[in-house]
Image (spheres, helix red, strand yellow):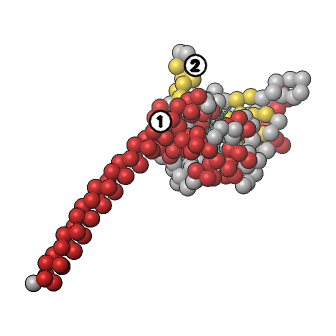
Amino acid sequence: MKNRSHVVGVIAVMVVMMVFGYGFNTKLAAQDKAANQEQVKHGEYLVNLGGCNDCHSPKVMTKMGPVPDETRLLSGHPANEKLPKVDMSVMGPDKWGGLFSNDLTAWAGPWGVSFAANLTPDKNTGLGLWTPEIFIKTMRTGKHMGAGRPILPPMPWESIGKVSDADLRDIFSYLQSLKPIQNEVPAPIPPANSKTGMN
Ligand code: HEC
């Protein structure tokens, strides 16, 4: 009899611990979610301040000029956009510094032609497989994915790379919260091919 009440006691303690633990975990999960929402909100604020939409969002034309297309924010240079040939002869030290497409997603200059990357979390064509660490390293080093080829102008990684790890993490959280959009941005065109390489 004594043994039995002992067992009941132990079970009762276990049940209380489980219930308490469950409550505790859901509270932690709710706190995590709130913290993440804060990060996303602050990340959006920094992305607006950093002008990322100017170059990384396709545009719709309005009377006031091009504005970011809200249906595909930050999805990069549209893969199907037709661009005219680049007249490299207008560029040089005593001429124009560069040219850009009407939506500001393609940029020609002494570096050839660069196309703004897809920053949405699409796994194949965007940043879906990136981690916050890769993102931070990319902005700090100016290398593709933090380890590859040098990132071309006019991507302002030098200035973005000067903000704190926490801010870069918030920017990345916001980018990861976007609607994933499948859009395979073309590889950059080297200077020698710029005149003939456009579609
Ligand atoms: C003046 C135009 C411009 C602005 C502003 C800009 N970018 Fe870019 N970005 C580019 C271009 C062009 C590329 C592609 C460069 C290349 O292919 O080497 C690029 C590439 C990137 C890449 C891919 C890097 C890689 O590993 O290949 C990331 C990530 C990125 N930008 C994030 C941002 C964020 C975040 C902001 C705002 C805080 C921003 N960019 C603002 C033009 C811009």
Give percent across and percent down for residue 38.
Answer: 45, 39
Taking the image as drawn, is residue 115 in sight? no
Of the residues under marks 2 and 1, which one precedes in the sequence? Answer: 1
Above/below status of 153 relative to 138: above
Amino acid tagged 2? Gly
Kindly identify which residue carries mark 1.
41
Residue depicted at 18% across the width and 79% down the height: 7
SS at mark 2? strand
Give percent across and percent down for residue 50.
Answer: 61, 31
Kindly identify which residue carries mark 2.
65
Amino acid tagged 1? Lys
Q: Residues within 10 Å of mark 1 (few under 14, many from 20)?
A: some
The image quadrant where one finds the N terminus is bottom left
Using the image as rendered, state which of residue 99 and residue 117 is in the foreground: 117
Taking the image as drawn, is residue 148 in sight? yes
The image quadrant where one finds the C terminus is top right
Gap in angstroms between the C-alphas marked 2 and 1: 27 Å
SS at mark 1? helix
